[in-house]
Amino acid sequence: MSQDKELEIRRLFLDEAQEYVNMLDEAILGLSSNRIEIQKINAALRAAHSIKGGAGMMGFELLADLAHRLKGAFKVLKNPSPEIAIDGNLENLLLVAINALRQLIAHDRQNQPPDPPWLQDQVEPVFQQLHQYLGDPLDEMWPQYWRWIVDRISCRCCLKLRWKDVWNG
């Protein structure tokens, strides 16, 4: 593929990523004053997932990493624990994280790396605060594994009881 064609594809992705970032903003604005709307969280999950995947394929590794971390926050919000306060502080952290994605897209569009002190002093602390606030997302497969384990334990207990019944009499 020619270098011009590759550059055009990368620019198209960055345009699309900007649209996804705008979708993230729409999903989060007003979060603290309303209850969580699952449709908005699902839209935010899809947008963050699309940014992560596209950025990874295009070689925008930092953008892919931060989009992945933001996606984890949305996974937690999809099924929040009662201990998580959905308040203005959380909404602000999410909006600042989304803005960091927006700024990374601008840097990538100009083919300029972001300023390391900005990443270290402003971006990373926000994502760390989000993680502290929300924790890790649960593995979506966990309920299926749990059900499988419980079924196996129940079956073995039943088998042992039946075997005892047979053995004793």
Image: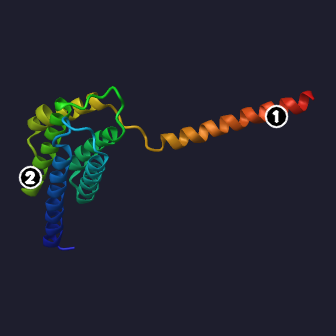
| Picture quadrant where residue 2 is located | bottom left
Crowding at mark 2 (Cα within 10 Å: few <14, some 14-19, many 20+): some
- Which residue occupies 12% across, 54% down? 108
Q: Quadrant of the C terminus?
A: top right
Between discs 1 and 2, the one toward the N terminus:
2
Q: Are marks 1 and 2 in contact (CB under 8 Å)?
A: no
Q: Nearer the viewer, residue 148 or 87?
A: 87
Residue sitting at 18 percent across and 36 percent down? Answer: 33
The local secondary structure at tag 2 comes to helix
Q: Which color scheme did the rendering employ for the protein?
A: rainbow
Looking at the image, which residue sits at the far right?
Answer: 169
Left or right side of 35 for 100: left
Q: CA distance from mark 1 to mark 2?
A: 67 Å
- Quadrant of image for the N terminus: bottom left
Instruction: Give residue 149's quadrant in the image.
Output: top right
Q: Position of residue 162 (x, y in %)?
A: 82, 34
| Residue at image point 64% right, 39% down | 151
Kind of residue indicated by mark 2? Ala
Residue 101 percent coordinates (x, y): 16, 47
Question: Can you tell which mark lies on residue 106?
Answer: 2
Viewer-proximal residue among 9 and 70 = 70
51 sits left or right of 22 in the view: right
Residue that numbered label 1 is attached to = 162
Tell me the element at label 1.
helix
